Image (spheres, rainbow, N blue to C red):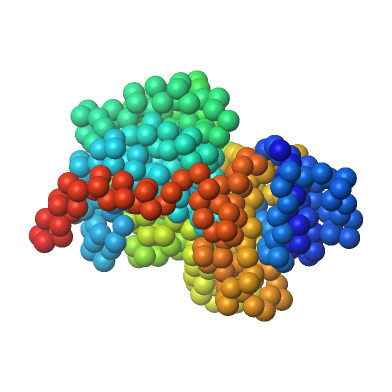
Amino acid sequence: MKTLIKNVHILTMDEQFSEIKAGYLVIEEDTIVELAPMTTLDEKQIAANQVIDGQNGILMPGMINTHTHVGMIPFRSLGDDVPDRLRRFLFPLEQFMTKELVGCSSDYAIAEMLLSGITSFCDMYYFEDEIAKSCEKMSVRALLGETIIDMPTCDSPEPSGGLFYAETFIRKWQGHPLITPMLAPHAPNTNSPEVLAKIIELSRRYQVPVTMHVAEMTYEMAEFEKAYQKTPIAFLEELGYLSEPFILAHCILATDEDLASLAATNGKARVAHCIGANTKSAKGVAPIKQMLDQGIIVGLGTDGPSSGNTLDLFTQMRMVSNFHKTAHQDRSLFPAKEIVYLATMGGAKTLGLAEQVGSLEVGKKADIALIETQSVNMFPIFDAYSALVYSANASNVEAVWVNGQQLVANKELQQANLKEIKEKLYQAMNTFVKEAKKRAAL
């Protein structure tokens, strides 16, 4: 199968930020095999099975969501302005999450991400095997990890039961072409040192990455200072976490010493920056300028649909710009092209996928998004990067390919029916909704 996409403004997001303002791209099976200016196009020679006229849209790498919880769609808009929402709503209501509900939620969340141009994501939740099945069914690329936490959960009656689930999960899914299993301890302060040590040992044994919420909460920082006279990052470094591929979500409260430690890993420790969730919860703005200045790899994440509410990176890109420019009182900080890089190649590097995806280059997998420029919000365009960051939104995503397979065309899913996905989720949420309403009334 060979697909030609023509009449597009190509943003390759390679290290040189190469652009082809009027170009075409050819996909053969799952791989990008050619991209060049329209002036060199010979359609007869290419002999494509499918030809798509991009109508001067922006062709870019599929965006990469470096931190989310796709099983949590049922929590969206629940207790958004409650001070201690985690303990009042999230933890108590998670006991009503079932295998069926997580699967339905995952289908819906993946649909939402695909329709917004996201082609890869990193997830941490419960019943992660159901999430993997959803990814396989929806043909999306993902890193997936079962949450490990020192309390009983909806899929494990024993504290830290996720550790045993995770090992079985890794064995089952390792080697899958689109799904990468990983280990996902919830946080340093919600796992014992013994369990944390076991997790890093499993990471080494199975050669899988680890992801964890780190330096996110003020009480997390206080607990480690009191117990160990260390920051959580320093504690994890002592356990060996910074010597293995490690995706740290948030790092809002990372100290200068922490950043120096992360920088010294030469890319093994990477940060998932979730500006929407961090600022909505009033936790702060992570020091990603300092991180990037020190060579720390950073990608963008939506966090879960209960934390950041939307699962698109257009929202996050705009918020990165607005919050960091304001925090530093510097309008020139984070030019739009650098923010688009964080949402694409930065995300690929964060998830360890940069050899496969993240940029439009010959030989890479065809994970691609086409952004239409015909809508009212997309005219005029002097700078395509600025249009993506400041003007575009998820509704401008015209088409999406993952691994060469077109999953979105004409702004609609091609392998799934959104209406049916929503109806199944609605039915599966029945008990959860009743319990959520009881909690809201307290």
Q: Residue at x 48, y 41 (%)?
A: 138
Residue 295 appears in view: no
Q: Residue at x 67, y 44 (%)?
A: 366
Q: Is residue 14 left or right of residue 98?
A: right
Q: How many marks?
A: 0
Which quadrant holds residue 8? bottom right
Q: Residue at x 40, y 41 (%)?
A: 124
The x, y position of residue 29, in whole percent, is 70, 37
Q: Nearer the viewer, residue 6 or 353?
A: 6
Residue 169 appears in view: yes
The x, y position of residue 205, in whole percent, is 50, 20
The x, y position of residue 338, in whole percent, is 65, 62
Q: Nearer the viewer, residue 72 or 49?
A: 49
Q: Nearer the viewer, residue 190 or 412?
A: 412
Q: Is residue 227 left or right of residue 203?
A: left
Q: Nearer the viewer, residue 5 or 214?
A: 5
378 to 203, vertically: above or below: below
376 to 344, vertically: above or below: below
| Quadrant, the N terminus | top right
The x, y position of residue 148, in whole percent, is 34, 34
Q: Residue at x 38, y 31 (%)?
A: 129
Which quadrant holds residue 398? bottom right
Which quadrant holds residue 207? top right
Q: Is residue 90 left or right of residue 71?
A: left
69 to 136, vertically: above or below: below
Q: Is residue 228 left or right of residue 244?
A: left
371 to 43, vertically: above or below: below
| Quadrant, the C terminus | bottom left
